[in-house]
Image (spheres, grey):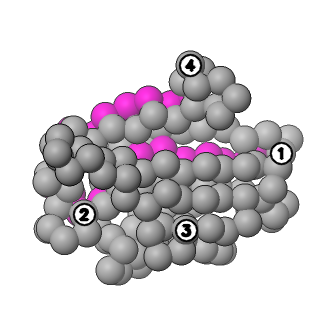
Amino acid sequence: QFINVVDYNNMNVKGISHSGDVMDNYNRVGHHTIHVYLKQLPGHITHLFFTLSAWNSPNISRYPNPSLKFYEASNMKKDLCKTTFTHAGNSQAVIMCFLSKNSQGRWEIYESGKRSAGNAKNYDPLKNTILNLISSGY
């Protein structure tokens, strides 16, 4: 069951905060920071998906070097997931990575790179791609 979206319109949900755009207009670069506090998440949450989508363009090719750095807040040198998404430039969105709670209740991290349609104007196609990933056993 889908629970919630955390994005620039909905920046704080129990256990998750989203920075919104953090821009360096001079150098034409930006980033978003998402903090996840796993111990604060409600127990029924089993999956968290991290996506990148095109907001005002037909695809994410307008982001010249999309990448993801995923690490423990207590140890920023400990990479948990780090990848780029140059293969997804012609897609409207890409699922960068996701966390899935295993049968022992431990969170596991998966790199994805799965391309999808959908964005903040219409999340439905992206939700369908995510549901298909969950149905396939993740």
From the viewer's perspective, tell me whether residue 82 is left or right of residue 79. Answer: left
Q: Residues within 10 Å of mark 4 (few under 14, many from 20)?
A: few
- Which three-letter amino acid code belongs to the residue tagged 1? Gly
Image depth: mark 3 or mark 1 in front: 3
Q: Mark 2 touching mark 1, by CB under 8 A?
A: no
Residue that label 3 marks: 11
Image depth: mark 2 or mark 4 in front: 4
- Which three-letter amino acid code belongs to the residue tagged 4? Lys
Q: Position of residue 87 (x, y in %)?
A: 21, 40
Residue that label 1 marks: 105
Considering the numbered disc 2 on the image, is that residue within a helix, a strand or a loop? loop
Image depth: mark 3 or mark 2 in front: 3
Residue that label 2 marks: 54
- Which three-letter amino acid code belongs to the residue tagged 3? Met
From the viewer's perspective, tell me whether residue 4 is left or right of residue 132. Answer: right
- Residue range (magenta): 80-103
Q: Earlier in the sequence, mark 3 or mark 4?
A: 3
